Each structure stands twice: as C-alpha cells, then as structure tokens.
Image: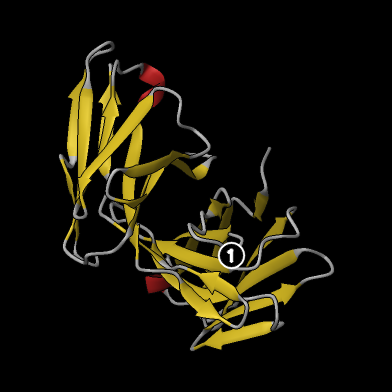
C-alpha cells in the first residue's frame, strides 16, 4: 500500500462522540486525501491537503475536519459522529504533480482503509 | 450531480471472456482518466490511465478506449481470469495543482471459472 498506514483499521462508536482517524505515510508525498466509500456512491472526497497546514474541502466535507501538522500525518476528525458517517474511510497520497506537455497529472495511492461504524 | 457515470453496476463474465466497463463524463475540462481496481478489504490501486490525446491505451490484458467527442471511456479486460474478480472504478480529473479525482460508482466484476 505504498507506505501508507491508517489507524484504527476498525472502529465502532456511538452517535455524538468525537472520532479521529489517522493516516500516516512514509513516502514524503506532498498531497494527501481523505475519501469515504459507500455502496452506490463510489469514493467521494472529504478533504485534502497540499502541504503542511494547507488543507481544503472536498465534495462531502460537512461534519468533518482535518489537520496536517507534519508531512507524514493527515488526521480526519468527526467532531460529533452521526450514523450517516458510517462508512469505509480511505486515505490517499500523491507525489508532486507530474507534467506531460502542457498538462499536469497526479497518481493517487490508497491506504488499506478504516471501517467506521456509528451506532 | 454525478459527474462521472459508470455502468454496469455488476458484471459476470466467464473465464477467458472479455469484460467491458463503461464510463461517461460531463465536464469537458477533465483531461486525466484513470481506472482503479479494488479487492475486498483493500484500498483501490491504480490499474491503467489515459489522457485525451490518445484514443486507446493498452497494458497487458487491460485496454482503455477513449472517445472524446462522446465524452466516454471504457475498460476492456481481455481473457478475463478469476483473479480479475474485483471492483473497478473509473475516475476523472482536470489538470492543476491538486488534480482532485471524481470517481464513478464502481462495477463489481465476477469472473466465473
């Protein structure tokens, strides 16, 4: 999994409790992403980071916050978990954008995932 | 609004057959189209990707066909094997600093021996 670990791998929690998921990389890649995966929706971007302390929202960011104080760690926090946040969460990393001609692209590498159940 | 539409949702193919998964996109600014393969309990892994300046890209048994005018692209798996049984996701992004990916909803492929 390209030097990416996620912790915990499984978590069961109750509605209203705070939850923090951790993504750790050993690749020194600049970009990090948090996705959630749900049946019928594929993977949807929650938040992403383009450097230490530089983060931005994705398409489903409501109810989530992130922090990145070090290059290697990207934390996803659910301030007050709800049942709708039951999902599998994936972290992804990307190296510096590759350039081909006038366009630039990145390749994202995914971690093993965290299965979160909110009761 | 689903920017990348993927079909079919599931697919059963006999060993040795051809698996075909289709995707359509809406945003003409997209210029990078990867396919990811995911096995149960694992994270998605990049399988193959294409840029819009070519109509086809082949890597081993896997081929992407791209139709820019129709805003469609597809994954073909030739000589499908039981080990290819997985969920496949198409995605799209537009070039830029962050290249955020927009994923399709996934296709569960089962290759029967």
Task: Give the percent coordinates (x, y) of residue B108.
Answer: 50, 55
Q: Mark 1 points at which residue?
A: B95
**In this orientation, which residue lies closer to the viewer: A22 or B88?**
A22
**Residue at 52% across, 59% down:** B99
**In this orientation, which residue lies closer to the viewer: B9 or A27?**
A27
Q: Is residue A20 left or right of residue B33?
A: left
- Residue furthest right in the image: B69
**Residue at 46% across, 64% down:** B36
Task: Give the percent coordinates (x, y) of residue B29.
Answer: 71, 60
Please determine whether, in this image, residue B79 is positioned above or below residue B6: below
- Residue A36 visible (yes or no): no
Task: Give the percent coordinates (x, y) of residue A99.
Answer: 51, 78
Please determine whether, in this image, residue A59 is positioned above or below residue B23: above
Q: In this view, does B101 lie to the left or right of B7?
A: left
Crowding near the residue tagged with mark 1, few <14, some 14–19, many ≥20 C-alpha atoms within 10 Å: many
Q: In which quarter of the image is residue A54?
A: top left
**Residue at 77% across, 63% down:** B71
Task: Give the percent coordinates (x, y) of residue B105.
Answer: 56, 48
Q: Quadrant of the C terminus of chain A?
A: top left
Q: Quadrant of the N terminus of chain A?
A: bottom left
Please determine whether, in this image, residue A3 is positioned above or below residue A99: above
Q: In which quarter of the image is residue B75?
A: bottom right
- Residue furthest front in the image: A53
């Amino acid at each position: 999994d390209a030097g990416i670990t996620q912790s915990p791998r499984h978590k069961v929690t109750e509605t209203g409790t705070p939850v923090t998921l951790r993504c750790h990389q050993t690749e020194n890649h600049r970009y990090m992403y948090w996705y959630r995966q749900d049946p019928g929706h594929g993977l949807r971007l929650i938040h992403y980071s383009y450097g230490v302390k530089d983060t931005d929202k994705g398409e489903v960011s409501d109810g989530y916050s992130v922090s990145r104080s070090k290059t290697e760690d990207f934390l996803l926090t659910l301030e007050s978990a709800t049942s709708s946040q039951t999902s599998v969460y994936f972290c992804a990393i990307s190296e510096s954008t590759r350039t081909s001609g006038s366009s630039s692209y990145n390749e994202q590498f995914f971690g093993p995932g965290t299965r979160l159940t909110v009761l | 609004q689903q920017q990348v539409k993927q079909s079919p949702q599931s697919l059963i193919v006999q060993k040795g057959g051809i698996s075909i998964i289709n995707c359509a996109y809406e945003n003409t600014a997209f210029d990078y189209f990867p396919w990811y393969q995911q096995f149960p309990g694992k994270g998605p892994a990049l399988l193959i990707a294409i840029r819009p300046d070519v109509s086809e890209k082949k890597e081993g048994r896997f081929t992407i066909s791209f139709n820019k005018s129709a805003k469609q692209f597809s994954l073909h798996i030739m000589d499908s094997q039981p080990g290819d049984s997985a969920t496949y996701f198409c995605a799209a992004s537009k070039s830029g600093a962050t290249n955020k990916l927009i994923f399709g909803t996934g296709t569960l492929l089962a290759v029967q021996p």
